[in-house]
Image (cartoon, grey):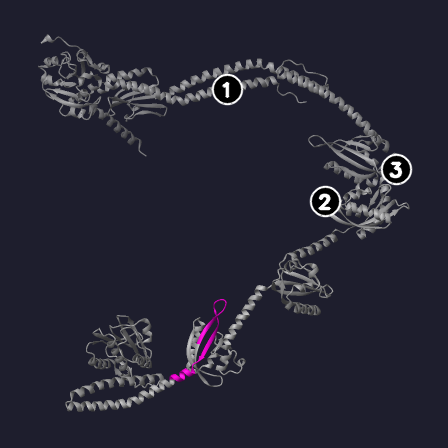
Amino acid sequence: MNQIQEPIQHKITRAILITSTIVLLLTGLTYLVFEFITFRESTVERMSVLGEVIANNSTAALAFESPEEAYEILSALRAQEYIVAAALFDEHGGLFSKFPATLDSTFLPTEPNKTGYFFRDRYLHGYQPVVLGEKRIGTLYLNYDTRILSRQFRFFGLVALSVFIFSLMLAYVLSSQLQKKISRPIVALADVASSISRRKDYSVRGVKQSEDEIGLLTDAFNQMLAQIEQQNLALQESEKRFRTLADNIAQLAWITDKTGYITWFNKRWFDYTGTTPAAMDKYGWRNVHHPDHKERVVEGYKRAMREGYIWEDTFPLRSSDGNYRWFLTRAVPIHDEQGSIIHWFGTNTDITELLEAEKRLQEASDNLTLATEASRLGWGTWDFRTGEAQWDERARQILGLSQTAATTSDGWLSYVHPEDREFIRQHVEDCIASRQSFDMEYRITNEHGEIRFIHATGAFEVAPDGTPIKGTGLVRDITEQKQAEEALRKSEEYYKTMTDNTPVMTWISQPDALCTYLNKQWYEYTGQTPETGLGFGWLGAIHPDDAGMTEKVLLKATDEQAPFSLEFRLKDREGNYRWHIDTGFPKFDEQGVFEGFIGSVIDIHERKIAEERLRESEEFSRTLLESSPDCVAALDLTGMLLSINPQGLIMLEIDSFEKYYKQSWFDVWMDEHQQEAYKALDNARNGKIGHFQGVAQTFKGASKWLDVLIAPVHGAGGEVERLVAVSRDISKLKELEQQKDDFIGIASHELKTPVTSIKAYTQVLHNRFEQSEDQLSADMLMKMDTQLDKLTKLITDLLDVTKIEQGRLQFRMEEFDFNELINDVVEDIQRTADRHQVVQKLVKNPKVVGDRDRIGQVITNFLTNAIKYSPKANKVVVSTSINSRNELVVSVQDFGLGLSEEEKVKVFERFYRVGDPGYETYPGLGLGLFISTGIVHRHNGRIWVESEKGVGSTFSFSLPLG
Amino acid sequence: MLKPGLLRSLSFGLLLAAWLQPLAQGQMPEYQVKAVFLYNFSQFVHWPDSAFAEEDAPFVIGILGRDPFGSYLRETISGETINNHALVVRHFQTPEEANASQILFIGESDKDRMREILGKLKHEHVLTVSDMEGFGQMGGTIELAREKNKIRLKINQEAAKNKQMDISPKLLRLAEIVSTENSNQR
């Protein structure tokens, strides 16, 4: 037990003293600190009050310049020992008076005109203004020596110290007396406790001295002592009981201390080993171990002691008679409440007999184990009379039997799936009754909750009276096999569900073509039933016109074992027929033996109808094409012939089209028309309609005038896919035209000679009448001459036209001055035009190569037109210019009727005359501009008109220069 | 760093300058000092309210007869006020006129008719001041007497009482108190 280092009395006294000291110190310190902090403030306050009073009293002295009076006033400060200097300054800062009078002036401020109180070094300097009315008439200066303060503090410190010491002494005296009341009972209790612990005598009791907490403590202590006393007795009793028990158990037993040193052996140990406690001391127990095992045992024992786990071992121990017997040994550590080991308790159990029995058993079962191991079969036998069962290891594994369940004949039944139990019971009964061997499959639930399938076979031994004696059986796990079967079944079911729910009708036939299966859709669509549909009944739902063909196709396909596909009309339950396509595929088993067909029937009615319509439409088109009088040829985009209608074949004199397939269409045309054919084809390729007329050479060498229209054929995407050329034979028309032209040519030529003669005679006649002064006749002949001129002009025009048409217009090319030509023409025109003035706007000196007369003809035509069609105007303008293409442009502008857009194009055509109101009064054949156009074109020039209705027209042509 | 000798002569110069300044002021012209005194009297004397005709009436420092102050008095009081009364200087020729002032300086020029003047103003609220010798004994309120090189105040407290004016004890302490002597002396 610990020695008391410091009695409780001292502790209490010290606690009180420390408390008092701290309180006193804190109080003193707080006051000191407070005083120190407030000292400056209070000093300033005191001094400012004093300063104000003196300053106030000094006003008159300062105002009336009385230093004597001022000194008198300052002298009042004599009583204030801490004021070491005082002085009055006038308003300019001049020293007025000071105190004490002997005060050295260096002690005073040089600039006193301040206000306020300032600490510097250990002095407080005060500047108090002296105010008269509202005016500062001077300053009072005070100097306070703060050293006086430290004197005050020193005194305060002394007082505080003496109070402090006195208080502590008082506290000590009081506390040492007062603490006794608390400490005495505790000390008494401690004495009792220490005596108990010394003498281990729990019968001693503490004496209660007061009714406070310490009294309660004493009571509790006494109560505790009573309990300990009781427990001590119980423990001794229990230990005695344990020893009696331990001495008399069958096992050898022993107890170690925490280090593994055995402190106690039971009586059985000594009886068995024949040793004494003295011999067992100091690890003497090693001597009873078999030499072969001793080393291992000691090693294991030490390791267990060191590492603190349960030690188990089997080893032989020598008995008193010198023989060794085998013991199963087990040592268990015993822990205290903190978990550290305080003892080991060990037992040695004699297992010699057990080991021998086990050995025999092992030898017997080894053979069977070997046999069943190889076959993956479990083996079991059960006795109906004793209710005992025996299962080998594999059977237990297969069935998942626990140790206990394996020993009774009904044990395994609790593992069997509840749904299968009744069936097993029934089967077993049947087998016993019929004395037959059993063979069954059932499910069991193993320890993991997993369902396994078991196949069990075996036989029963049955007494002659029919009671079963013994059963022997083999079990096999067939779960995997079962699962595979289940998967297969499910997949078949799935397939069936799937086909029954597809909109497609399906069927299956046998190798003899008999239908064995029709799906739900078939029955729903046709309204048939399996009775009416299977076999060949399904043919009844097919249109009578198609049924024969269908049967034939199916039989043929069956015969050939080849896939087939056919279309037929199928009657729905309302009696309407719709087109369907039936497709069948032959089915073969794994050996390649034909098993029949599997087929599907799909509605294709809409498609079929669409096809039918298309076919009809195509037929119509074909008929149309074939009956057309025109040549209709299909061309690809490069102009290769794809097809020609019969009329076309005739027209082009083609016997067999095959020869000409993919031949170039351009080869048909004569050289001079090929260019136009290309152009027309180009138009069509770009989605427009191409048109031209040309001479084609038939394939037999004949020439034909054809009028051709080429049109694009658009594909589904809108792009031009191919072209159609429709050619009409216009040879007849062309021939007639030619004849007409020839006729006009010949007629006008034939007319020209007589008219010229008539003109000549007219002039001769005119001269003669003038000479005979028959003026009337002369005038008449003059009119006749004019009409003859017109006739001549007409004939010339017609001849020109004919020549242009036939390309026979002759030109005499020469270089000439263009302005001179214009002057000649204008002079000529001006002679007959009395109303219009021809205005010329010409470029200088243009030299042109061309036929001077023919070009003059063009200008004359332009000018006569301009005058003729602007009856109300008084001028026309002829102008020339040279454009950017180095062409001479000749324009004639009038201010007349003007032309519409439509007329602007047509005005250059042969025999065209403007038919608008206002134009009808002007005679003419409408050949002038046509001839002009011919002339200009032959000079490689261009001709055009700009015009506005009611404003006037400008006709222009251009001629290339140089 | 300065040499010690130089430092000493520098501090001596400063001290000399500080000592000369008040000396120069001490030689202020006599009437400049007296002008300041006249003004200062207003701070130490309490006039009854009836001394002013109106609340905002000016505080008049009057000069009877010849003005010995020149511009000093005007400079002294320029811009000053006493209890919200603006300070003004006025010149008077007769005691009747001078009745309107609060402080009245009577110059030596009126020496002969001093008694008559004082008699007329005996009960008026006019603080009479003069540097004429014997003014106090004659019944004047404050006499600015010359004593060596200084001005000494002589106050006739009795005269002040007659005018219902209180003179501050601070001022009285500085002054020599005199009383009216028999007027029949002359």
Q: Position of residue A138 (x, y in %)?
A: 25, 23
Badge number at residue A23: 1
Chain of the residue under label 3: A
Q: Is residue A679 visible?
A: no
Please tell me whether mark 2 sits on a helix, a strand or a loop.
Answer: loop
- Left or right for A232, reference A388: left
Disc 2/disc 3 C-alpha distance (Å): 52 Å
N-terminal of the pair, mark 1 or mark 3, is 1
Q: Position of residue B183 (x, y in %)?
A: 11, 9
Q: Quadrant of residue A3?
A: top right
Chain of the residue under label 2: A
Disc 2/disc 1 C-alpha distance (Å): 79 Å
| Residue A736 is one of the magenta-drawn residues | yes
Magenta residue span = A709-737
| Circles 2 and 3 on the same chain | yes
Q: Position of residue A157 (x, y in %)?
A: 45, 18
- Amino acid at the residue labelled 3: Asn
Badge number at residue A5: none
